[in-house]
Image (spheres, helix red, strand yellow):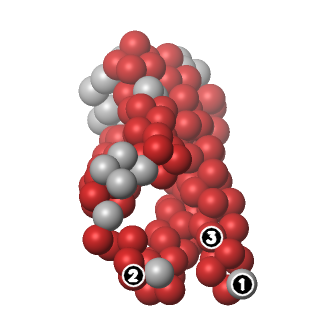
Amino acid sequence: MMYLWIKTIHIVFVVAWFAGLFYLPRLFVYHADAADPQTRDTLKVMERRLYGFTAMNAVIAIGCGIGLLVLAPAFLHQSWLHAKLLLVTLLVGFQHVCGAHLRRFRNDTQRHGSRWYRWFNEVPTVLLLAIVALVILKPGL
């Protein structure tokens, strides 16, 4: 029963983590287009708060994922999980790259336009699709 509760919490916080990773780059798109200083200042606050919220969700999601592996270590021998963990590592890296972009916006030193951020915004979608496919299809079993 404990396993199912941890799994439930894991899924909820993964969803919340991805929600933040979908919206943060969208804020970067708006920020790159913003000409008004007041709008840019508002976006800076929104980005900072969303990044903190997203990071908190990531920590809880990853913590619950580790808890699931502690309770069911046999999963560690399955290749689909190795691939999933690699993608989660890339997702954590994406989160850190978002943090770097956030700092550039905060310091008014960002160097990309809104079109670049529109493409950047698609990265978590691709990772989510791949992660969910691995979890549902469990290739290699």
47 sits left or right of 81 in the view: right
Distance from label 2 to label 3 (Cα)?
A: 14 Å
Question: Which residue corresponds to mark 2?
Answer: 73
84 sits left or right of 11 in the view: left
- Mark 2 vs 3, N-terminal side: 3
The amino acid pointed to by label 1 is Met
Question: Which residue occupies the foreground of this view, 103 or 131?
Answer: 131
54 sits left or right of 141 in the view: right
Image coordinates of residue 80 in percent, x first then y, are: 34, 54
Image coordinates of residue 96 in percent, x first then y, are: 34, 53
Question: Which residue corresponds to mark 1?
Answer: 1
Residue at 47%, 36% (x, y): give it: 129
Distance from label 1 to label 3 (Cα)?
A: 10 Å
**Which mark is nearer the camera, 2 or 3?**
2
What is the crowding at mark 3: few (fewer than 14 residues within 10 Å), some, or many (at least 20)? some
Question: Which residue occupies the foreground of this view, 110 or 56?
Answer: 56
Q: What element carries label 3?
A: helix
Residue 121, placed above or below residue 134: above
